[in-house]
Image: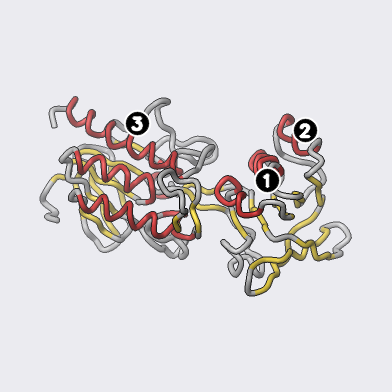
Amino acid sequence: MSQDKIQKVTIIGSGPAGYTAAIYAARANLEPVVFAGGPTLEHPQRVPGGQLMVTTDVENYPGFPEAITGPELMERFQKQAERFGTALHMENITKVDFSQRPFLLESESGMQVRSETVIISTGATAKWLNVKGEDTYKNRGVSACATCDGAFYKKQDVLVVGGGDTAMEEATYLAKIVNHVTIIHRRDSLRASKVMQERALNNPKISFLWNSAVEEVVGNPKGMTGAVVRNLKTNDSQLVTATGLFVAIGHTPNTELFQGILETHQGGYLKTVPGSTRTNIPGVFACGDVQDSYYRQAITAAGTGCMAAIDAERWLIEHGE
């Protein structure tokens, strides 16, 4: 890629949103460039392709009745984007200048890119407990998404960690599928909205361990078998038997690069104009989990990726490009 050329569309990030945006932009002859991202010092576990790269079986993405692994699904997205002429760089963008057009971007290798439009699809990172055994049993019992993985735990006992709306939503959803849900919360009261609290508290399949925290996730070669839970008031620990642990303490949108440049919601997610992917800077669009704190699904991320590419194409036409 010539650094003198002004790109029509540059996509920062990958995953279902970024790759879908690339597919649509490429088929519109916009010759998109994708900087797919990768590990950083602050986030060494990040990989191109987003959170699906650390997901085993995906059973809820349409078109795959036999299920597909997350990495395989992302590989197919990537190949489809490249098939239509997307230029792909497996590195991060580290600097952006949106003060004038064409926008100026710089990658970690020092590559400079000028672009008429930019689509941001940097996603969000799940917050984890960072306790012993958590990494060992990720995708073998430990999950950060009940909607994604709940079906694997039919008629089993599971744990949910958290006290906000997300935790109550996850627990209520799981209660329809599993045998029993135990919510583990560090305090003696919930932070969730009143209606969400009532749903969980009144559900006979949900119980609570108050003033408690997970100390360790335990298991065997087949997967997780339980968690060591400590009471923060008495300091007593107990082994709670369960085959699943759902961490519902929130996500962190990957927006560090855009702080002070693009408008964000209170939780740090990028603001977009309702019904579109437009940000507060004309010509800059956002899609996927970086702007979605509610759904956070592969299919919705892909949908907003499509929207972003169409928004960018129409914006270019409106501005004589």
Is 176 left or right of 76, judged from the image as shown?
Answer: right
Q: Distance of mark 1 from mark 2, alpha carbons? A: 19 Å
In which quarter of the view is residue 289 placed? top left
Of residues 280 and 212, the one nearer the viewer is: 212
Q: Amino acid at mark 1?
A: Ile
Q: What residue is drawn where x is 64% and y is 59%?
A: 129
Q: Nearer the viewer, residue 220 or 30?
A: 220
Q: Which residue is mark 2?
A: 198
Q: Closer to us: mark 3 or mark 2?
A: 2
Q: Is residue 297 left or right of residue 84?
A: right
Identity of the residue furthest to the front in this view: 66
Q: Earlier in the sequence, mark 3 or mark 1?
A: 1
Where, by quadrant of the figure, is residue 50 drawn? Answer: bottom left
Which residue in the rendered view is the most extreme toward the right? 234
Residue 258: x %, y % from top left = 39, 44
Q: Quadrant of the N terminus?
A: bottom left
The residue under label 1 is: 177
Type of amino acid at the residue the image marks with label 3: Arg
Q: Which element is circle 3 on?
A: loop
Closest to the observer, 273 or 154: 154
Residue identified by numbered label 3 = 278
Is residue 230 toward the left or the right of residue 107 in the image?
Answer: right
Nearest to N terminus: mark 1 or mark 2: 1
Residue 64 visible in the snapshot: yes
Mark 1: few, some, or many residues within 10 Å (few <14, many ≥20)? some
Q: Is residue 59 left or right of residue 284?
A: right
Q: At 20% across and 37% down in the image, what residue appears?
A: 101
**Marks 3 & 1, CB-CB < 8 Å contact:** no
Separation of residues labelled 3 and 2 (CA atoms): 37 Å
Mark 2 element type: helix
- Upstream in the sequence, badge 3 or badge 2? 2
Query: In percent of the image, x 50 and y 60: which residue is there?
Result: 56
